[in-house]
Image (spheres, helix red, strand yellow):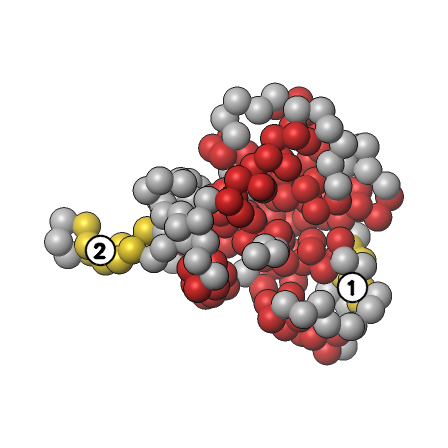
């Protein structure tokens, strides 16, 4: 299957054997919202800056999640910042929809159980490891020194912002991760996308965590 950046992120966010989530739900959900926004930018459907999201081309990409997000952005009649859109796009429901889609494609398996025989829990171990293996090979190549394409660079930047890079690739060179995540090597459009998404994911996850603590 051709996975989206958000789906690739999900595959890296769960342990391969036990299917346990490696980072908090708040971090992961914010990252998924950012990944959806970033993929629209990589496909030149929108442009991102620190101050606004602008539609460049409303043509659907053929993916339900991406096309729904693009349509929402195109229908909004007010100028909005990337952070505003990530907050609108991310949710536990988005995570669940993407995980279910990966399970239906035969990539993951949904395993439901209970902790202490009472609290319901769901794990997502791999059913077909070839998809994640391709993603890991691509990311590992970039972290090893190969110039990444825009999709891979955005994926690494999103992982870094969500603090997933240290869990999914514990042996990766921190300076190389930072170099890619800062987008210094990239063209102007990709660098702006990476910078905007990095900032937005960190702010969104922090804000959500503070809100959850207060409530």
Quarter of the image with the C terminus in it = bottom left
- Tell me: 66 left or right of 57: left
Report the number of numbered marks: 2
Q: Can residue 210 be seen here?
A: no
Secondary structure of the residue carrying numbered label 2: strand
Secondary structure of the residue carrying numbered label 1: loop
Q: Which residue is mark 1?
A: 45
Instruction: Kindly indicate the quadrant of the structure image that contains residue 178.
Output: top right
Instruction: Tell me residue 32's x, y (percent).
Output: 56, 54
Label 1 Cα neighbours within 10 Å, binned few <14 / some 14-19 / many ≥20: many
Residue at the far left in the pictured view: 117
Nearest the viewer among 111 and 37 is 111
- Tell me: 154 left or right of 187: left
What's the mark number on residue 27?
Answer: none
Q: Which residue is mark 2?
A: 113
Say which residue appears at 47% left-offset and 33% top-offset.
167
Label 2 Cα neighbours within 10 Å, binned few <14 / some 14-19 / many ≥20: few
Tell me if label 2 and label 1 are in contact, CB under 8 Å. Answer: no
Nearest the viewer among 127 and 215 is 127
Q: In the displayed structure, would residue 63 be above or below residue 205?
A: below
Instruction: Tell me residue 120's x, y (percent).
Output: 23, 58
- Tell me: 68 left or right of 20: right
Say which residue appears at 41% left-offset and 53% top-offset.
108
Mark 1 or mark 2, which is nearer the start of the sequence?
1
Say which residue appears at 80% left-offset and 59% top-offset.
44
Say which residue appears at 76% left-offset and 77% top-offset.
77
Q: In the displayed structure, would residue 101 be above or below residue 48?
A: below
Q: Can residue 35 be seen here?
A: yes
Instruction: Tell me residue 154's x, y (percent).
Output: 68, 44
Quarter of the image with the N terminus in it = bottom right
Instruction: Tell me residue 8's x, y (percent).
Output: 56, 49
Q: CA distance from mark 2 to mark 1?
A: 41 Å
């Amino acid at each position: 299957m051709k996975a989206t950046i958000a789906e690739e992120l999900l595959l890296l966010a769960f342990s391969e054997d036990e299917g346990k989530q490696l980072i908090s739900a708040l971090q992961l959900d914010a990252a998924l919202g950012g990944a959806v926004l970033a993929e629209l930018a990589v496909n030149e459907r929108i442009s991102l800056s620190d101050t606004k999201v602008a539609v460049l081309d409303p043509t659907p990409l053929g993916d339900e999640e991406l096309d729904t997000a693009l349509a929402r952005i195109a229908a909004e009649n007010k100028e909005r910042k990337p952070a505003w859109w990530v907050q609108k796009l991310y949710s536990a429901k988005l995570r669940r929809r993407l995980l279910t889609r990966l399970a239906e494609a035969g990539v993951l398996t949904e395993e439901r159980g209970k902790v202490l025989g009472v609290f319901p829990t769901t794990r997502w171990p791999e059913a077909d490891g070839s998809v994640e293996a391709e993603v890991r090979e691509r990311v590992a190549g970039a972290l090893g020194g190969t110039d990444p394409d825009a999709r891979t660079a955005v994926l690494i930047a999103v992982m870094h912002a969500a603090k997933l890079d240290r869990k999914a690739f514990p042996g990766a060179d921190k300076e190389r991760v930072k170099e890619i995540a800062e987008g210094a090597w990239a063209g102007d459009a990709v660098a702006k996308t990476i910078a905007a998404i990095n900032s937005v994911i960190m702010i969104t996850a922090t804000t959500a965590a503070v809100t959850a603590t207060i409530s």
